[in-house]
Image: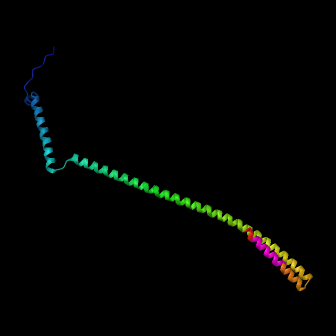
Amino acid sequence: MIELAPRHYHPDTTTISRFSGQPVLIGAAALVIIVLGIGSIALWRAYTGTSPELDRLAAARQLQARTVQASEQLVEKTKGIEATQQESIDQLQVVQDQLTTVRRLLAAQQTDTRKLSEQVGTLTESIDGLRQSFASAQSSDPSPVARRSARGKFKAIRSAHRKKGKSQG
């Protein structure tokens, strides 16, 4: 068995031993200090009228309201951008349709220009031929009757070409 050594009296150990011997007294004193602290905090809050919990709750609600408002604004701006984008797409399609129409008209006009160039070339050849025949007819027969008949032929050919050009156009 283990023997315990007798305790010697020491002046510092007597106060500690008094409190350590009565844990209920220490617990009660701690409880009174805690209750007094909580009471003083409650009185301070009641006197000043502010509560950190209420402030935090109000700040959280305000933050939620701002978040909702920002989200709604973002949705509205997104819808506006979508509408603008759709309008741009529609306008681009109209421009593309107009460009296609202009291209078709330009191709038709180029075709008409080619036809007219060919007709002008044919007329030029006919006029040259007529001039040559008129010049040869004049040099071989200088009579006024021959000149009238050549002019009549020239007018007949010219009116035939005009009628031909109108019927093709």
Residue 169 lies within the magenta run: no
Query: Which residue is pictured at 40% across the width and 55% down the height?
Result: 76
Q: Is residue 76 above or below residue 35?
A: below
Can residue 12 be seen by looking at this rendering? no
Name, please, the residue furthest toward the top: 1
Q: Position of residue 148 (x, y in %)?
A: 86, 83
Depth check: give the residue in front, 74 or 165. 165
Image quadrant occupied by the N terminus: top left
Can residue 113 be seen by looking at this rendering? yes
Depth check: give the residue in front, 107 or 167. 167
Query: Which residue is pictured at 11% across the width and 40% down the height?
Result: 36
Image quadrant occupied by the C terminus: bottom right
Image-quadrant location for residue 26: top left
Q: Is residue 103 above or below residue 144?
A: above
Q: Is residue 84 above or below residue 12?
A: below
Q: Which residues are magenta?
A: 153-165
Depth check: give the residue in front, 142 or 56. 142
Q: How many marks?
A: 0
Residue 163 lies within the magenta run: yes
Image-quadrant location for residue 100: bottom right
Q: Position of residue 142 (x, y in %)?
A: 90, 85
Does residue 130 appear to the left or right of 99 in the view shown? Answer: right
Does residue 86 appear to the left or right of 25 in the view shown? Answer: right
Query: Which residue is pictured at 55% across the width and 61% down the height?
Result: 94
> Mostly what secondary structure, the magenta segment?
helix
Q: Position of residue 13 (x, y in %)?
A: 9, 29
Depth check: give the residue in front, 29 or 114. 114
Does residue 151 appear to the left or right of 60 in the view shown? Answer: right
Name, please, the residue furthest toward the right: 140
Query: Which residue is pictured at 15% across the width and 44% down the height?
Result: 42
How is the structure coloured here? rainbow
Does residue 169 appear to the left or right of 12 in the view shown? Answer: right
